[in-house]
Amino acid sequence: SQTIHQWPATLVQPVGSPLSLECTVEGTSNPNLYWYRQAAGRGLQLLFYSVGIGQISSEVPQNLSASRPQDRQFILSSKKLLLSDSGFYLCAWSETGNAQPQHFGDGTRLSIL
Amino acid sequence: GEDVEQSLFLSVREGDSSVINCTYTDSSSTYLYWYKQEPGAGLQLLTYIFSNMDMKQDQRLTVLLNKKDKHLSLRIADTQTGDSAIYFCAEIFNYGGSQGNLIFGKGTKLSVKP
């Protein structure tokens, strides 16, 4: 069966520090991968998605970037964190193809001080 | 633009039925989804319905789809305290390419009172 892992579960970082959140998927090949942010208002905002190694689509301009160095690894990064980057970050995967359900990791709670 | 609307709160008594409603905008959506999020956790896929169906039942969950009105509902029978969570409705929004992305509502917080 397929599993998705995100780490760390919680992170407290100072303003201006770098960020690296990692997400890996097991039990499937060539998945679509997604990064979402969930702010205090509870809505989910799609940040990035990837349909293959090295292929990243950005949905909103921001202080963050994403990379997919391996088929089942998706990394969310920032060179310098802002206060507004605080939130709950969720990684998800789906099978290749249109209209496939997405399956979420447990999320990372990021607090910027 | 694409939008998914849900009421933000619902409160029911244990044992009653809960009905969570959602409206969406993309008439070409092929699948519509319901996710559940417990406090501090990720989203769990509860159920989904294909757009050519009117109803789907899965144990205590019933999904109704009215394509004409672009209205989706999730009914939870015999609601339990463990059903307390935020429920998200989501539609696939097709940008015209091969990749359809999920558009989520803001979520309905279900509170179940004993």
Image (cartoon, coloured by chain):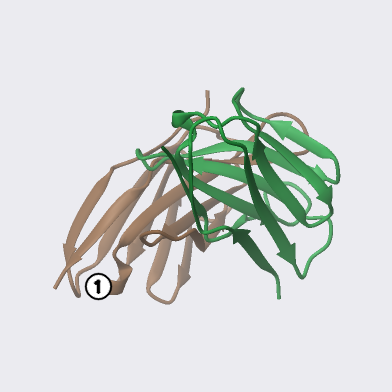
Chain colours: A green, B brown
Which residue lies at the image location 76% right of the left edge and 54% below the top edge? Answer: A73
Q: Residue at label 1?
A: B81
Q: Is residue B45 left or right of residue A93?
A: left
Which residue lies at the image location 62% right of the left edge and 37% below the top edge? Answer: A18
Q: Residue A50: x, y in percent?
A: 75, 42
Q: Toward which corner of the image does residue A76 lie, by quadrant?
A: top right
Camera-side residue: B78 or A79? A79
Q: Residue B38: x, y in percent?
A: 38, 62
Camera-side residue: A17 or B69? A17
Q: Residue B68: x, y in percent?
A: 46, 38
The answer to whether one can see residue B51 in this image is no
The quarter of the image holding the C terminus of chain B is bottom left
Q: Is residue A26 left or right of residue B89?
A: right
Which residue lies at the image location 49% right of the left edge and 58% below the top edge? Answer: B42
Up the image or down, B11 lies above or below B22; here it is: below
Amino acid type, label 1: Thr
The answer for which chain carries disc 1 is B
Up the image or down, A73 lies above or below A44; here it is: below
Secondary structure of the residue carrying tag 1 is: helix
Camera-side residue: A31 or B68? A31
